[in-house]
Image (cartoon, grey):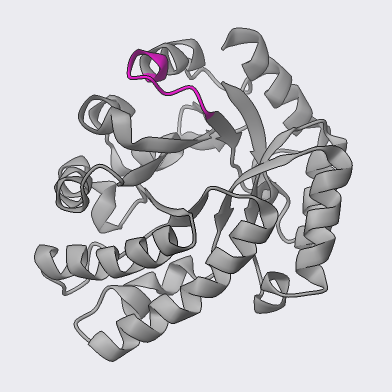
Amino acid sequence: MKIGISSSCLYPMQTEEALRTVGELGAKTAEIFFNSPSELEKPLLGELVAIKDFYGMEIRSVHPFTSAYETYLLFSDYKRRTLDGVEFYKQYFGAAKVLGAEMVVLHGGLSAARIEPDRYAENYLLLHNAARENGLYIAHENVHNHLCGSPSFMKALADNVGDEFKMVLDIKQCRRCSVSEDEYIDSLGSKIYQVHISDCLGEENCLAPGAGKYDFENLFKKLKSVGYDKSAIIELYRQNFAEISELSTAKAFLENIQ
């Protein structure tokens, strides 16, 4: 399994500088978190490609800066806004293709969203189909306070979409939802396409791997048992570590046990 680092760990560092730092830390696998519309276009997108190529990095996934608005952009009963939202997300698809990424990460609708499950699936399929037309996948993440923070909701959506459904398993979000990651792995193991990892200790639920007591060896064993062998991406917030070098220490820690 490849151990990578998300550029989001370094926010609010400019995205191109964050990716360059990820490269300097020795990561060969990364996720890019876009933070501004201009990053989806030249010249900034070209700069990201140049940085990726210089350090020989693989960009497996990209993360939209509009995640917080997906309830309203994509998962409401207002069809015109949904269609316009899908058109907007095609900008992410275009940027992802240029970077050689395989997927665009989706947070989806909030738990409080007033949308029926059938409509949610219908809207999701519009986005899914647009992504597939561009050779990409939408990868739905399990996020606290979101509908797919429930394993049963995610499973129902996956069953509706079919074989091509993909998900991102984020273990800190599992902690925040008081859900065991085993529930997702057991019911959706074959659908997992990316993993976001972090450590925990007591009430601290998002620490650099190795700084807490989480059993990563067991996680990797469980993932491999369902055939997952792609990548595990360290995804933290900048306040979760003191020195940037801690990210490379965390990467080495994970590489030594997986």
Magenta: main secondary structure equals loop
Q: Is residue 226 magenta?
A: yes
Tell me where residue 92 appears, x and y as whole percent.
56, 67
> Of all residues shown, which one is farthest toward the bottom?
80
| Rendered residue at 19%/82% (across/down) | 77
The residues colored magenta run 223-230
Q: Is residue 8 above or below residue 3?
A: below
In-front residue for pair 82/208: 82
Q: Give the answer, above or below, for where 43 lies relative to 4.
A: below
Residue 31 placement, left or right of 107 = right
Quarter occupied by residue 42: bottom right
Q: Is residue 180 visible?
A: no
In the figure, residue 117 lies in which quadrant?
Answer: bottom left
Question: Residue 36 colored magenta?
Answer: no
Q: Where does residue 126 sit, x and y in percent of width and height?
A: 29, 70
Examine the rendered structure and indicate whether residue 50 appears above or below residue 206: below
How far across and how far down the image is residue 30, in percent?
67, 41
Q: Residue at x 31, y 46 (%)?
A: 164
* Quarter of the image where the C terminus is located: top right
